[in-house]
Structures are given as C-alpha cells and as structure tokens.
Image (cartoon, helix red, strand yellow):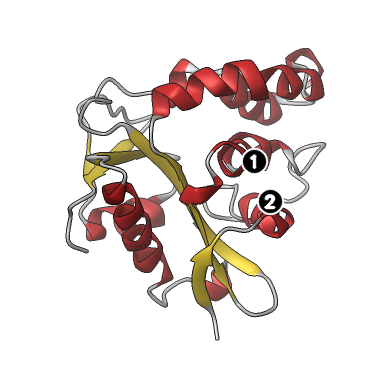
Amino acid sequence: MSSIRPYQPGDRDDVYTVCIRTGASGGDATGTYRDDDLIPDVFAGPYVTYQPDLAFVVDTGEHVAGYVIAVADSAAFVDWYAAEWLPSFAAKYPLDTARDDKEREAITFGLDLQGMLVPELAAYPAHLHIDLLPELQGQGFGRALIRTLLAALRERGVPGVYLRMSPTNHGARAFYEKLGFRELPSSTPDGPVYAIATDAVL
C-alpha cells in the first residue's frame, strides 16, 4: 500500500524519474532533451540537496511515485544555489549548445535565479514543487503531500509558501485552486504564481 514518508537519500533516482515523467506540463518529458536529468537538475535535485528535511515522498512499496519538495527560505536558497549548484549546472548544460528552443528554455530556467523569487516573500518565504505519476493521481495523495508539507513549514515558523507553474498545466491549476491556493499579484499569464498560508485547513 502506498504511503507518505520523509525523503531518504536513496530516493534521489526515483525523484528524478518522477520529475522528468511529469516534466511536460504534467506529461512525460522523457527524451525531450539530450539529457533526461535537465529538468530534475532544475526542479528537484537542488531542493533535495539543500533541504532534504522538507521533502516528502509517496512510496508504493516498490518505488517512489510522487513527492513534494520545498525550501523554507527562498532567498537563502537562491544564494546557496548561486554559489553551490549553479556553477556545475552551467558547465553541464551550456546554453549555447542547446539543441532547440525547448531545451534552451529549460536551461534558462536553471540559470534564472531571480525568476525563482516573488515580490511577496515576506508573506510567502517558502516555495515548493509537487509531482505525482499517473498511477497515484486522483487518490488524495496530492492533498496529503501538501498537508504534510504545510505542517512541516508551520513547525519552522514559516507563514506561507508559493509555487510557480506552467501556464498550460490546466489540471495542476485546478488542483491548486481546489486546495485553496490563490494567485499572487505578481502572477502573470505566462508565469502563474500561486500561494497558500501554512495554517490553511486542507
């Protein structure tokens, strides 16, 4: 039976697999880029490296099929990312060698430090990423993962958490709105940003 538990170092490969298999606006992005690690190296790897205690996974008993990962202080995370993650990322994925516009856009996400932040950091200093493989969707695991993360953030005194999402991922938008996430003033049609207080009742 699938269950939620804290992330463990041995989960990293499964987390990377979930990330790439949901990396096309919720669909499978495997084979889209020259290296399937590109998307996870932006949206998963730095998080479980920097703050693994704010990562929670859904374990099916055979593998990890979903996760929520977060950082409590986005500004501090960006400072760390710039110093510790960005140099190796930029060396691994030179922007001028991107094979097409899609790959160039993905690499740019990994290079855009300020794009990770929002003006509303005082109220929502944390940010998250959540992904579930199709085998887990529609079973309540998304809500349970968010609930688990909000509790962990509350324990750290964090008042709120935000997320960025693809404008074409309509299923994700409906999911977040159903849970009570609200669009922030800094949100744009091309870059939707949603947030929720950690004391929200889900």
Count numbered badges in the picture.
2
Secondary element under disc 2, as helix, strand or loop, is helix
State the residue at coordinates (31%, 62%).
147
Task: Identify the residue under disc 2.
Answer: 16
Against 154, residue 159 (above or below) is above
* Residue 34 visible from this viewpoint: yes
- Counting from the top left corner in percent of width and height, residue 201 is at 17, 61
* Residue 132 visible from this viewpoint: no
Q: In the image, which disc is placed on residue 45?
A: 1
- In terms of image quadrants, where is residue 114? top left
Residue in the foreground of this view, choosing between 17 and 201: 201
- Counting from the top left corner in percent of width and height, residue 60 is at 60, 77
State the residue at coordinates (62%, 39%).
49
State the residue at coordinates (28%, 26%).
121
- Counting from the top left corner in percent of width and height, residue 30 is at 73, 51
Q: In the image, which disc is placed on residue 178?
A: none
- Counting from the top left corner in percent of width and height, residue 143 is at 34, 65
Neighbourhood count class around disc 2 (C-alpha, 10 Å): few under 14, some 14–19, many 20 upward: many
Q: Check disc 2 and give the amino acid type.
A: Tyr
